[in-house]
Image (tube, helix red, strand yellow):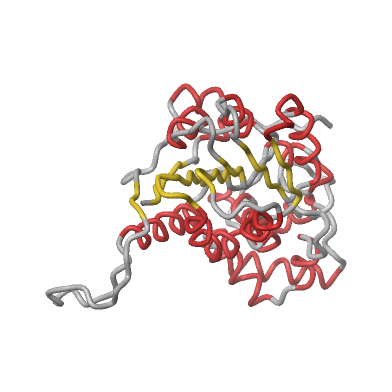
């Protein structure tokens, strides 16, 4: 299957990167290469783009799409969590811009064997963005305790029926292992009141989000490495992060704000004594949202938010 993914907030991201033709840029979630391609079009001379992705299918697709720019392109099969180490290994200690387009790609959603979507009935429960990893969705659904499932669905899916869904999953797997998306869908549907299930979209949507986040450690990776990426920026460099749900957006908003105003002194102190200095400024006091036209053309962009931070 061809790797297809429509880059969300493409023009807004490229504009806010404020690209220098001779700069060094990183696309930490390379995907199909949409954002990377637009960056590469603007580079000249010593300009360089490093693309990182943990999905082998994305790496193959982007390498093919961007083959005309290979002199200025380096593609790395890794998680953006290892960005600092991967850049150091190729002699790069600082960059002029970073792009993160978080979440799951259209290709991953539309490829049944990847097991990301509740819209398929006979797909295996996988959901690994990096298929070199051992933990998959099947392991989580069949191996986590009821309490662990409840915590995951409540915290990562923000589903008010998390307790009942976890209970139904445990009861069902005692009869036989849960192997497919169709099996899981029916279990979740049975755990949610019918009058609720008829409104607000597919009843399994939030649980699938929760399992995917858990399987790929998405929030931990973002929370644990965003500060590190800000430190990689040269003065004037910018990081653009596109999120697709409130959990991601809240982390980005908080970390950006902390890097802009890091002082931890009590409010009543006349002067700062903690010594913490701002690393830069938030350029998006409110997130940039897709236009009405983009949302109509690409419904998956509806929940996207772009936040931008500039190093000083």
- Can the viewer see residue 191 in this picture? no
Q: Position of residue 278 (x, y in %)?
A: 32, 61
Q: Residue at x 80, y 61 (%)?
A: 133
Q: Residue furthest right?
A: 176
Residue 298 in which image quadrant = top right
Q: Position of residue 241 (x, y in %)?
A: 50, 46
Residue 82 in which image quadrant = bottom right
Of the pair 13 and 123, the residue shown nearer to us: 13
The number of numbered discs placed on residues in the rendered structure image is 0
Of the pair 110 and 67, the residue shown nearer to us: 67
Q: Position of residue 181 (x, y in %)?
A: 78, 51
Q: Is residue 262 above or below residue 306?
A: below
Quarter of the figure that contains the N terminus: top right
**Direction from residue 272 to residue 199 in the image, left or right:** right
Q: Position of residue 252 (x, y in %)?
A: 45, 55
Q: Residue at x 33, y 51 (%)?
A: 281
Q: Is residue 46 above or below residue 181?
A: above
**Direction from residue 266 to residue 238 in the image, left or right:** right
Q: Residue at x 48, y 51 (%)?
A: 233
- Can the viewer see residue 305 in this picture? yes
Q: Is residue 148 above or below residue 194?
A: below
């Amino acid at each position: 299957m061809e790797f297809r993914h429509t880059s969300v907030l493409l023009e807004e991201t490229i504009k806010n990167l404020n690209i220098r033709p001779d700069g060094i840029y990183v696309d930490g979630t390379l995907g199909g290469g949409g954002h990377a391609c637009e960056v590469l079009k603007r580079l000249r001379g010593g300009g360089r783009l490093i693309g990182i992705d943990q999905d082998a299918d994305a790496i193959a697709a982007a390498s093919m799409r961007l083959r005309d720019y290979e002199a200025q392109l380096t593609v790395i099969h890794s998680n953006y969590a290892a960005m600092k180490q991967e850049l150091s290994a190729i002699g790069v200690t600082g960059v002029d811009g970073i792009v993160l387009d978080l979440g799951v790609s259209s290709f991953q959603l539309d490829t049944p064997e990847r097991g990301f979507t509740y819209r398929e009935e006979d797909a295996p429960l996988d959901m690994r963005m990096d298929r070199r990893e051992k933990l998959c969705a099947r392991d989580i659904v069949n191996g986590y305790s009821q309490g662990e499932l409840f915590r995951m669905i409540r915290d990562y899916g923000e589903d008010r029926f998390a307790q009942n869904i976890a209970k139904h999953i445990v009861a069902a797997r005692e009869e036989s292992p849960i192997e497919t998306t169709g099996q899981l869908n029916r279990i979740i549907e049975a755990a949610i009141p019918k009058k609720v299930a008829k409104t607000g979209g597919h009843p399994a949507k939030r649980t699938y989000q929760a399992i995917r986040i858990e399987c790929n450690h998405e929030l931990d990776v973002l929370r644990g490495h965003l500060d590190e990426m800000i430190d990689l920026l040269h003065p004037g460099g910018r990081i653009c992060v596109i999120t697709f749900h409130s959990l991601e957006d809240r982390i980005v908003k908080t970390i950006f704000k902390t890097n802009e105003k890091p002082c931890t002194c009590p409010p009543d102190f006349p002067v700062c004594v903690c010594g913490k200095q701002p690393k830069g400024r938030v350029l998006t006091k409110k997130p940039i949202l897709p236009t009405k036209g983009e949302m109509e053309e690409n419904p998956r962009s509806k929940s996207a938010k772009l936040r931008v931070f500039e190093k000083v």
